[in-house]
Amino acid sequence: MASDNGSNIMASIDEMMYSVGVETLHPGGLEKTMEMAEACKIIHGSKVLDIGNGKGFTAIRLAQKYGCTVVGVDMSKAMTDYAKMSAETKGLSQQINFMNIDAHQLPFGDNTFDVVFAECSTVLMDKEKAFKEFVRVTKSGGYVADLEMCWRKPPDRKTVDRAFEIWEGFSTMTFEEWRDFFAEMGLTEIRLNDFSDKLRNMTTLYIKALGVMGILKISWRMLKNKSLRKAMLEYDKFFNNNKEYIGYGYFVGRKE
Ligand SMILES: C[S@@+](CC[C@H](N)C(=O)[O-])C[C@H]1O[C@@H](n2cnc3c(N)ncnc32)[C@H](O)[C@@H]1O
């Protein structure tokens, strides 16, 4: 699959991981997705917006479990096509609509969705611009939820810059800053689930998700492609060198 959200190596890595069978790229996987869904009170008939849907795993699981309708948005055409195909194969095309658009500008009216859900995607966005849109399209009384890598304590400038560089525009905040940010965006009843201690090493997580065949396929791809290999090693190094800073959690807030 060609990378199409810019010429970035990160999109190629996401696509490579997905192509060998990794279903979802966010920390905590399905377990945390379902916890977040419960916290957002998703029920049969809810209208959910999934921001940066990737391969469509979360949208599909939510639609299957709750009978909700889901719109997924992703700026990668490859991901959108992948997700559409997956929904179609599972007979969910009527229930889920995947759109190839930028989440900073959503083509939906105010108060459209019961829940806006984001996993591992807003760290790649202009958070203020994106969240204004998320809150705008959420119905009053509805929920906005976001699961991201967060800083456990304020990192030094070098760490922030390195994360921005290797993950092409990545920026996150400390748990406290995220909480304040949710409040600034007008969300209330803000809840944090910090699962940093349960998930100390992303590389181990990916190895588990890949399985033996996945590891063999990825190794072969990395052997053939120097830039992919270099980037994967950089990610691993970053995770190892910054254990004290790296944390994971999700926030849920309610629109008044
Ligand atoms: C790390 S992946 C996570 C995908 C999925 N949420 C998951 O948990 O597996 C990040 C996704 O966000 C998408 N993305 C990044 N910036 C975006 C934007 N401005 N608008 C829409 N999608 C975006 C990328 O194309 C990619 O599919």
Image: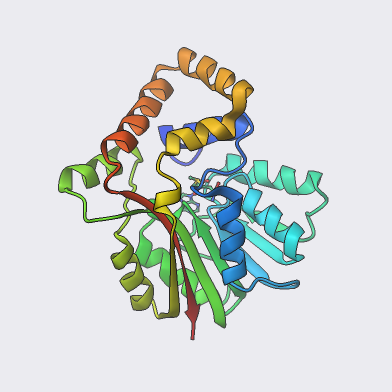
Where residue 37 appears, as percent x and y from the top left, is: 61, 65
Q: How is the image coloured?
A: rainbow
Taking the spot 69% from the left edge, 54% from the top edge, the residue there is 61
Residue 240, placed above or below residue 59: above
Above or below for 34 versus 18:
below
Q: Residue 82: x and y, percent?
A: 66, 41
Looking at this view, name the residue that lies furthest to the right. Answer: 91
Which quadrant, please, contains the N terminus?
top right
Q: Residue at x 76, y 61 (%)?
A: 95
User: Horizontal placement of 182 versus 137: left or right?
Assistant: left
Question: Residue at the spot x=30%, y=55% of the render?
Answer: 152
**Where residue 146 sits: x, y (%)?**
47, 62
Residue lying farthest to the left in this orientation: 157
For image coordinates 47% across by 18% down, the residue present is 222
Nearest the viewer among 254 and 245 is 245
Furthest residue toward front: 197
Q: Is residue 152 left or right of residue 63?
A: left
User: Quadrant of residue 73 in the image?
Assistant: bottom right
Q: Toward the viewer: 181 or 100?
A: 181
Residue 139, visible in the rendered structure:
no
For the image shown, how many numbered marks are present on the structure?
A: 0
Q: Position of residue 165 (x, y in %)?
A: 28, 39
Residue 94 seen in this snapshot: yes
Left or right: 130 in relation to 59: left
